[in-house]
Amino acid sequence: MAATADTGPAPPQAAPQKAGGLRNDPRVQMGGQLLGLAVVFAWCIFPFLWMVLVSFQGTVALRDANIFGGPFTTGNYTRVFEEGFMWNLGNSIFVALSTTVISILVASLAAYAIARLPIAYKFTILAGTLVATVFPPVSLVPPLFVAFNALGQLNTYQAMIIPYVALTLPLSIFILTTFFATIPKEMEEAAKVDGATPFQTFVRVVVPLAAPGVFAAAILVFVYAVNEYLIAFSLASGDPNVMTVTVAIATLDRVGFEEPIGTITAASTIVSIPLIIFALAAQRWIVSGLTAGGVKG
Amino acid sequence: MSERALGRAFLTPAFVVMGLLALFPIVYAAYESLFDFDFFTRTDFVGLANYVDQLTSPRFWSAVFVTIAFTVVSVTLEFIVGMIFALIMNAAFKGRNVTRAVILLPWVVPTVIAGQMWRYLFEQRPGYINEWLGLGAIDWLGSGASMFWAVVIADWWKTAPFVGLLLLAGLQTIPNEVYEAARVDGATWTQRFRNVTLPLLTPSIVVALLFRSVDALRIFDLADIMTNARLETLSVLAQRSIVRAPQPDIANTLAVLTFVMIMGIGLIFIAMMGRDVVGEPEEGS
């Protein structure tokens, strides 16, 4: 018995040990992790890389699928600016900011009432809010198209802002309610003891404490409004002075350029870069807003 | 003002806005769907005839089928890749924050831009995807099946990272000790994933699937842009019937049918999974 054990280490036994050792090797682990992260990176960034390179290609280079092939030019950008695209960008920002201010204001009040104040049917209201987030926006398009058409309100800023506010309220209320619920009650009670009215308590104590949550919800509403296409296209695509960037980018190729891909990628790059910078800067709030309500600790 | 009165006052604006601008239009569309139209003028009361027309129309049922198929396929693919992304980011020590920032990029960029990017990537000229993958001259956006898959791929690209982000947040709430205990007990990676990660991650998974499914059911942007509305989902069909070729009787009927179907499916999801999202009634009241 002893002899057999000495004559040779059995290969089948050694192999799994070695594999286990390899898997526990910190360098191999680190390498595997970095490889995984590289895959995630490539997935997220590659189409943008393509977009930016193509946006600098001229008519000749655009006939070739090689994205690194020149000659490169800024001609697409010049044409986009000449088309008045910056005005569309201004429209988008105006519509998104208006939507955000109104929606967050109205939602904060409702969320505070649900989270803190003694109201009847509290659970039903919160559940109803969650159900309302499912609302299909396309169902609003026919009735609002008819109504705005009759009132002469098609192709106006309000034709977008009004439905955006209605559609973003449920999610804003839901997110803000979860944020308000995490503020320690003691702070409010202390204010009450000091003689503050319920409204003063809300404005002086709760609002400042809830600022990060409010900011998170505001970012989500803003991003939604900048992204929105269905309603903007259906109710406000007829007037270039009101048209937002999403409608402009969607319809650029219908204007009749020879190589619309160049102008479309240039316009898309102009819109994407500020949004990307914004997302990176506001990352913390975006993540907390997206996961509020979702991940209950 | 008493707290009770303040509560009512605070709730009123939200209820008025949602009631007037979301609920009322639907009710009005339901009323108008009972009439015939001559261009934008209401003519005869026809009862449920418009609904009979739609519910016996192959075009309507094809839109229902496309919408549901798209939802099932894209949400499944997004969930799988999202889960892999979340596990990768959760395991990594270095570079996790950078990756978590980068993963937001597909989410923050408007769907219209994603649609245009993928449309030109799939187009035959100059044929980026066809050439890179050596596929020859496939006309991706030309016909039913490949058009469907092109839109699925674009949606997959845009939302898988978002799902990954939601799941990562859930993974980070699982205490490390639970894994240590499982490891000490000799559980393999697969066993740990099946018996520790999945059960503890269930609330996050439920939320991610819920939000993604109801979002996918409403798909419009990618189908409209990538296929010029040739891939007819429910939203594309309803939008076309009022904007591209106005027929208010059909449009109102489709608005109501879409509303009922999507809210119905949403309600079923929420009823099945809602406790994980809203919490127990005792907690909320």
Image (cartoon, helix red, strand yellow):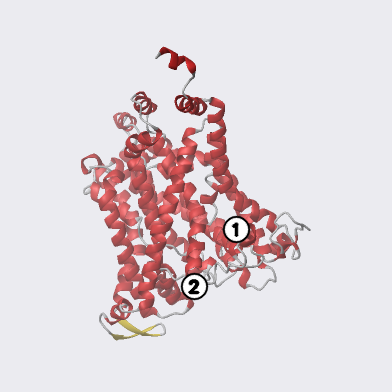
> Of residues B193 and A73, which is closer to you in this image?
B193
Numbered marks: total: 2
Q: What chain letter is assigned to the residue under label 2?
A: B
Query: Up-down: is A197 above or below B5?
Result: above
Which residue: 33% across, 75% down? B253
Query: What's under tag 1, amino acid-wise?
Result: Gly
Q: Nearer the viewer, mark 2 or mark 1?
A: 2
* Residue B174 visible within the image: yes
Whether label 2 touches label 1, CB < 8 Å: no
Which residue: 62% across, 69% down? A253
Rendering quarter of residue B215: bottom left
> Of residues B181 and A126, which is closer to you in this image?
B181
**Is A242 situated left or right of B75 in this image?**
right
Image x and y of residue A77, in percent: 71, 59
* Residue A216 visible within the image: no
Tell me the distance, in whole angstroms, between the alpha carbons under discs 2 and 1: 31 Å
Q: Quadrant of the C terminus of chain B?
A: top left
- Crowd band around label 2 with a 10 angstrom C-alpha radius: few (<14), some (14–19), many (20+): some
Query: Up-down: is A220 above or below A198?
Result: below
- Mark 2: which secondary structure? loop
- Crowd band around label 1 with a 10 angstrom C-alpha radius: few (<14), some (14–19), many (20+): some
Query: What's under tag 2, amino acid-wise?
Result: Arg
Query: Up-down: is B82 above or below A159?
Result: above
> Of residues A190 and A240, which is closer to you in this image?
A240
Q: Which residue is mark 1?
A: A90
Q: Quadrant of the N terminus of chain B?
A: top left
Image x and y of residue A114, in percent: 29, 45
Q: Which mark is residue B230?
A: 2
Image x and y of residue A295, in percent: 36, 40
Image x and y of residue A32, in percent: 54, 34
Q: What chain letter is assigned to the residue under label 1?
A: A
Rendering quarter of residue A207: top left
